[in-house]
Image (cartoon, grey):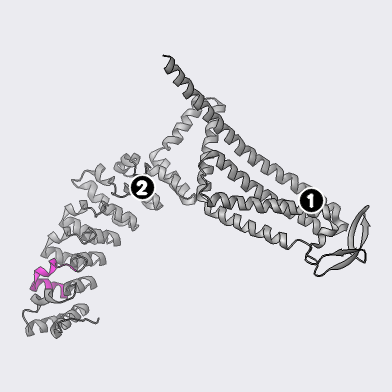
Amino acid sequence: MEITIRDGDDRMVRLYEASAEGCTASLNSLMEEDPRILSKISLNSLGETPLHISASLGHLNFTKQLVSQKPKLAEELDLLKRSPLHLASAEGHTEIVKALIEVNKDMCLVRDEDGKIPLHYAAMRGRVEVIEMLISAEPKSIQEKLNEGETVLHLCVQYNQLEALKVLVGSILEGDIQNDEFLNSKDQEYGNTILHLVVMLKQIETIKYLVLIPEVKTGASSLNRMGFTAFRMIEQLPKDFKSIKILNILQDALGPHPQTQKHDDNCKESSDASCWRQCLRYIGKYNVDWVKDRSGSLMVAATVTASMTFQTAVNPPGGVWQEDTTTTTFKIDNNTYCGPGQNQTCIAGTSVLGYIWKDQYMLFLAYNSIAFLSALSIIFLLLTGFPVTYKPFMWLLNLAIAGNITFMALTFMEGMYLVAPLKIQDEVTRIYYSLFYTWIAIVGIVILQHTIRLVNWAFKKILKHLKSSHALYTSTQV
């Protein structure tokens, strides 16, 4: 370790080198040369003392000798306002932590520039033995909060230190702290409890542990600054297997989601039609959440589709004529087609199949053009701040998506038909119509579902407006 001291004191350089190596013999030698060398430490230009270095590197004997010669070194802070106890706690050097506490246990409550005390550093790194030692030395340290109002429990969750969390919660439950209040403390910025935070970070094992604690379960209905309970946080997260598993854990431990329970009660008390309307509402909400979560993916898919349809238009199936070609006409099934000969000229760069299968090629172009325009519509709607939570716009977006996929499928089927050999045209036609009617049926069902949802929403809005107008009229008459 290379040490640079501005005042050029060779002894001070050697002292710092000895602290890095943990060499007590060098320390003794330096003190014989200059008995006041430890008193000069505060005069050097370095932010940390030799005790900071030896404590962080785990040199127990060197640390003990330093604090025995000058106990005040345990109170010195570095440039980040950290004491030697902060560094030893973070590194998990239990014996050094014990030695520093014996010198001055008040250092357990000293804050660095972020508001962290040694216990916070130990919790962040999961130093269980150090945590127990610090709490035993200064029980009040467990209640100290960071500058943003986070507790040591928040730090355990943020850094995914489950074992440290268990030790701290056990100490809280056994101590004189008001358990309900502290275990459900909120940070200042977002108002999140540790249950909010652990759900947001999807730490499944920690969730399983916390929901077994009665005091945490009592505070499960607490709202953060966004107005969400920990249960509701699941709805704001991307849908995946972890989210489903967490939802099941919370339901088993805390009971059904209040909204879900209300839905179930309504279904029991109402008719089948009412239950069906409730189900439609929940399906609609899930659909909105899905689109919000997947808007980026929709943008990518629409961009890819637009690129594919553009390339298909300029590079049609069957290729293009490479040069002007004089052709004759010939007949197949009483229809006239263009082929190599003398009576007609096929222009270079134009589609070969456009001359041979005119009607089918025009249909192919129509399908491809609609697919291209629907892809551009999706991109336009998403780029212009499309309000996906508004039902009519939601329906319009779903219609654009369904149309885009449908006409992409029709473009494929028409292209397949165009390039098929004449001798298998009948078989290709059967495949074409089988695919066509199957796909139209599937898309029709999806569009019908979204249309019913839109009509149901519009009907409720109109009914609500009529009721409010009637109430206003009645109150006016009175």
Report, in whole angstroms, how far the alpha carbon at label 1 lies from the one at label 2: 54 Å
Write down the region rendered in magenta: 61-78
Residue 471 falls left or right of residue 395? left
Which residue type does callout 2 highlight? Answer: His
View extreme (left): residue:
35
The magenta stretch spans residue 105: no
Which percent across, then down, holds residue 221? 34, 39
What residue is shown with label 1? 431
- Tell me which residue sits at (27%, 50%) in the image: 169
Secondary structure, magenta segment, majority class: helix
Residue 138 falls left or right of residue 465? left
First reached walking from the N terminus: tag 1 or tag 2: 2
Quarter of the C terminus within the rendering: top left
In the picture shown, does residue 152 fall above or below 464? below
Quarter of the N terminus within the rendering: bottom left
In the picture shown, does residue 8 fall above or below 73? below
The one nearer the camera, 437 or 73, is 437
Residue 356 falls left or right of residue 224? right
Which percent across, then down, holds residue 219? 31, 41
Element carrying mark 2 = helix
Which percent across, then down, holds residue 245? 46, 48
View extreme (top): residue:
478
Q: Is any part of residue 9 visible from this angle? A: yes
Mark 2 neighbour density, 10 Å: few (under 14) some (14–19) many (20 or more): many
Mark 1 neighbour density, 10 Å: few (under 14) some (14–19) many (20 or more): some
In the picture shown, does residue 391 fall above or below 63? above
Query: In the rendering, which numbered label is found on residue 196?
Result: 2
The one nearer the camera, 84 or 28, is 84
